[in-house]
Image (cartoon, grey):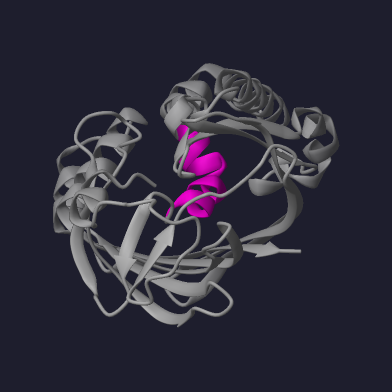
Amino acid sequence: MKKHTLLLLLFTMTLSSYCQTDTSEVSYVAYWSVGDSYDFRVTKTNMQWSGDSLTKNNTTEYVANFEVIDSTDTSYTIIWSFTNELVNTYDIPESLIEKLSKYSVTEVIYTTSEMGEFTGIKNWEELGQTMKAMFTELFTVLAEEQGSDYDALMKTAEPIIAIYSSQQGIEQMILPELQLFHFPFGAMFTVSDTITYEDQYPNMLGGDPIRAESKLYFESVDYADERAMLVQESKLNSDDTRALITRLLKQMGQKGSEFDAALGRAEYDIRTSTHYDYFYYPGIPIKIDLNRNTVIDIDNTKTRRVDNITIELL
């Protein structure tokens, strides 16, 4: 997640000493070296309800290796490698899992600033092509098995495929754990303060970003162990969320006056709470827990979704 607005509200970082010494503030700076390597367990869960009925309950897990392969005065280059079948993240029939397992993503190369701020995935085009090929083959097989119109199916899916194969889609939706991993870096926080600010999230469809009301505060700080628990809470702007969902559904072929009226009356509530437990020196997460609760009520039909991402140092 980007911190364009956040960084304007935080104090300027100073690097006059190698370690944290001021016990009124906590700085998140990457003190890494080439060859540094850490293993993390990443767990993603997704549960969905329609009314009171649980309709989806998925969990995926993998163990990743974080390794610094290059370091300059202005950047780090990282390899995030893992073994995970990408298709297990989606609702795909068991009969298709083996056929699509060739689209496993095993290595992500990305860069950060000299402070550890995420700057981008270098091999995103390769990953995007993998996603596009996987979806294309998936819909081809589904159309054959279900006797569906392939062209109509692909037209409906085009906006989703475009999102998931773009650079932002790869960074924000396929690998959100990297955004979480590097979120605090490049900032200094006053321990006693609660920071409230308007955050901005990338719009996957292009155009204006999605606004959010957010706040940051410390739950605990251990200066002796140079460890701190930072908490971020956010609520997406309901008008921006409505506009995004309406635009996406229209691109997928949904239209009509009743449809527009129903979306206009709909209520959206998307809240996220994330706990960042870090060794702020040398800049390594111990455990990150994200919980996102989404409630959408369209014409008294309430749909709820809960997403969790946990990154834990092994």
Dominant secondary structure, magenta: helix
The answer to whether residue 86 is above or below residue 52 is above
Quarter-of-image position of residue 96: top right
**Can residue 107 be found in the magenta stretch?**
no
User: Residue 241, can we see it?
Assistant: no
For this rendering, which residue is in front, 175 or 134? 175
Q: Position of residue 29 (x, y in %)?
A: 47, 52
At horizontal 70% and vertical 63% (from top left) the residue drawn is: 313
Q: Residue furthest front?
A: 16
Q: Position of residue 157 (x, y in %)?
A: 48, 29
Question: How far across and down, in percent of the image, does residue 278 sit?
Answer: 54, 66
Q: What residue is at 35 percent from the left and 54 percent from the top?
A: 187
* 183, above or below 129, in the image: below
Asked if residue 186 shows in the view, the reply is yes
Question: Residue 78, located in which quarter of the rendered image?
Answer: top right
Q: Quadrant of the C terminus?
A: bottom right
Left or right: residue 93 compared with residue 53: right
Query: Is residue 26 shown left or right of residue 182?
Result: left
Q: Is residue 182 left or right of residue 36?
A: left
Residue in the image at 47% along x and 25% along y: 166
Q: Which residues are magenta?
A: 169-183
Q: Is residue 273 above or below residue 27?
A: below
Comparing 79 with 75, the one in front is 75
